[in-house]
Amino acid sequence: MHRLLTDEPGQKMLLLGNDAIARGALEAGLAFASTYPGTPSSEISANLFQVSRETDLYFEYSTNEKVALEVAAAAANANVRAMCMMKHVGLNVASDVLMTLAYIGVNAGMVIVVADDPFMFSSQNEQDTRYYAKLSGLPMVEPSSVAEAKEMVPYAFDLSERLGEPVIFRTTTRINHSNGIVTLGSIPPRSPKGDFAKDPFRYVCVPAVSRRLHVRLLDNLKRAQGIADESPLNTVEGGGAWGIVCNGVSYNYVADAVKALKIEDRTKRLRLGFSHPMPEALIKEFLQGCEKVLVVEEGEPYMEEGVKAFAQEAGLSLPIRGKGEDLFSRLYEFDPAMVRKGIADFFGIPCESPAPPDLSDLPEIPQRPPTLCAGCSHRATFYAVKKAAEGLDAIYPSDIGCYTLGFLPPLSMADFVVCMGASVGTSCGFSQVTDKKVISFIGDSTFFHSGIPGLVNAVFNNHNFTLVILDNGTTAMTGHQPNPGVDMEKLHLSGYGRVSIEAVVKSLGVEHVTVIKPFKVKKSIEAIRSAIEYDGVSVIISQEMCSLYAKGLKELKDRVFTISDKCKNHRNCIDDLACPAFYIQNDRVKIDPDLCWGCAVCAQICPENAILPLKKKGPGEQA
């Protein structure tokens, strides 16, 4: 039995933040869940997927975030509690649905979990989801701890049903990927089947209907503001003439800072857990009697702007600060020391930071840039493309996935990356306005997510470029989740279909389509060269299972390579491939047998044929 199904109320359990959110959903009676995986939210989905194999919970990995929100919206309007999960940039994809779903509303509770990523640990931007709540007019809640994340999910479902609107549940990486003690509640029975009562004048958003629904949305937003004023998620602590407004993980940093600075009795702190709509009456009451107020929030000055507006309406002229060169940045994550210093500076309190430890006797930490795994098929594909395109002045648009790391030397196979699916669309533009050859890359999951429309556009408008689809049989970057092209039988899961990338590409009208096996280097180079020379849209489908995924399925060849005495130290292997299994010892190239996966790409490019399979030791022989 999955541990999140433990039905022992009162038991304490150490959980990852994402585990806690999944558990909270189960305690809320979640019956329908959908997602497109994206770090830092992926573990929520992984847990619910596993739970769905043991229970009547319905779970799906949808094609993209827009589809995920659409299927969840239908479930919630058919009276089934639903949750949709994504990362912050995923909400951009789903926003078309979000904006009108806010007008329609829901019948059963619906929670949209969105994980923001300050500092961009695994993302291309730091956008702040709180502005989507403001833009859509939907209520939003934000936990400050792992335990609170679990408790807030049932609250969000109840709030959704009370208002008849989806509720945005915003987290940040620090909450998603922290561990904390959670007290379990009970798991109620689910209601996985519902019914949809037809009402076109509510659910069919033609202009005449939407005009009336917009009035409904604004009425619900007003109701939500009243609820926010009384919500237990918004708390005031302490007392004094100095005020601090905070949210999310910043609340914990503030709590530690005021204690360390010994100003607990001089400051009152407002923590906003129900952060949109902002609790107007509560904030105005909080500001009364404050001499000055500091707003502590990661990301954009969302709360700061609101607090200043409420102060103006209340006729107050006290200093209210937050973002600024002398205070808090709009960049990256906060940390306890940063918040402590910001509070001390703003309120004019002496703050002596602890002296940094003396590390002068320690060696410098070696740089460890991210790299493709040893044995990664993407490295082989990039090498083959580079060789096939030698002598060409080419542009290489790429996309979002493990293969984005191909931008690093020596591969240098990414010149332009914007968002999911954009490699295909941007290839259309580059090929039209430049005379350079355009060769773009997209992963299998990303192709299904949002690459197909760009390819349709390319065929229709007769653009001229080569698209390389990197089909490694899984959604690798976020943790090996399935996508429509995955063979689910390998996971011993039945009841799924499978979509052929080759069939899809051909059905769109692409006339030059080639499937390669990138570990066969010479044949791959020849096939890619032929595709590059083709006048029009050509597609290469590079098929080779992700090495980590293959190992998990026990399909990886048990083969390791070593470098023989024939090596002339040309270092083509390192200079052209940069596989992390290589290392230098006594000025000679070596292969770490614990890292080598046996792809044999290096053996095929060695000019002396000096890289050979390592012979296995027989019984009694020493390795």
Image (cartoon, helix red, strand yellow):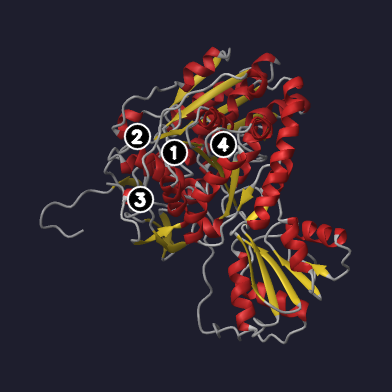
Q: Secondary structure at mark 4?
A: helix
Mark 4 to mark 2: distance in Å? 49 Å
User: x%, y% of residue 604?
Assistant: 40, 38
Q: Quadrant of residue 55?
A: top left
User: x%, y% of residue 581?
Assistant: 40, 53
Q: Earlier in the sequence, mark 1 or mark 4?
A: 1
Is residue 412 in sight in this rendering? no
Mark 1 to mark 4: distance in Å? 14 Å
Disc number at residue 499?
none
Label 1 near label 3: C-beta < 8 Å?
A: no
Q: Secondary structure at mark 2?
A: loop
- The residue that disc 4 covers is 386
- Could you tell whether 243 is left or right of 382 in the image? right
Mark 2 to mark 3: distance in Å? 15 Å
Q: Earlier in the sequence, mark 3 or mark 1?
A: 3
Q: Earlier in the sequence, mark 1 or mark 2?
A: 2
Image mark count: 4
Q: Earlier in the sequence, mark 2 or mark 3?
A: 3
- The residue that disc 2 covers is 56
> In the image, what residue type sits under mark 2?
Asp
Task: State which mark lies toward you, 4 or 2.
Answer: 2
- The residue that disc 3 covers is 4
